[in-house]
Image (cartoon, helix red, strand yellow):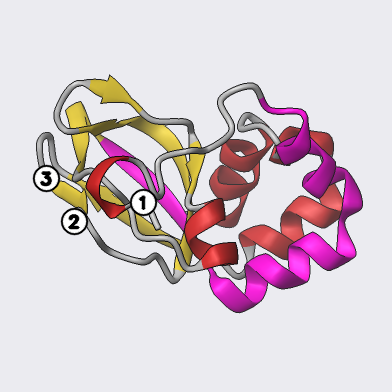
Amino acid sequence: MKLTRKIFGLKGTPPFDRLGYSELVAIAEVTHVKRFAPGERVVPSGHILQRLFAVIEGEVVEDGANRVPAVFGVRSLLDEMPIAAELTAGPEGAVCLLISKGHFYRILNEFPEFTLGFLSRNDSDDLEGRGEHRA
């Protein structure tokens, strides 16, 4: 995937939409693209993530039904909380940009507007720690 597609994919995804293009370029350069076929497992239940996921095409669903936020994995990265339910690609598949844990921490430190975007989200990224796996 070309860098410009990554940049525009991030720009259309909150909280990345709060950042300017120079910041998005820096982030896009360190992302890894992962494509998932329809129904393919994205994250198994009980897994602690080592990367932040930003879904830029398609969707990711929880237990085959509920759509998850376009950016997920924050609590798993920050608190080492396992994902409580299996996550799979939706009926049209999904294209995700993956950001390593180290780069995620760097983004939090260098771009406060990005961090504020998570604080203002309504869905609270609570995929981690629900159900049986809650600590």
Residue identifier under label 3: 40
Task: Name the quadrant of the N terminus.
Answer: bottom left
State how far apart marks 3 and 2 are (Cα).
11 Å
Q: Per the image, is 83 magenta? A: no
Q: Nearer the viewer, mark 3 or mark 2?
A: 2
Q: Position of residue 106 (x, y in %)?
A: 76, 72
Q: Position of residue 75 (x, y in %)?
A: 54, 54
Q: Position of residue 42 (x, y in %)?
A: 23, 51
Residue identifier under label 2: 44
Residue identifier under label 1: 134
Q: Per the image, is 114 magenta? A: yes
Q: Residues within 10 Å of mark 2 (few under 14, many from 20)?
A: some
Q: Position of residue 96 (x, y in %)?
A: 40, 48
Give the number of marks.
3
Tell me what residue is drawn at x 82 percent, y 55 percent.
Answer: 23
Q: Amino acid at mark 1?
A: Arg
State how far apart marks 1 and 2 are (Cα).
15 Å
Location of residue 17 by image quarter: top right
Q: Is residue 99 visible?
A: no
Instruction: Out of 56 and 80, give the one closest to the viewer.
Output: 80
- For the stretch drawn in magenta, the main secondary structure is helix
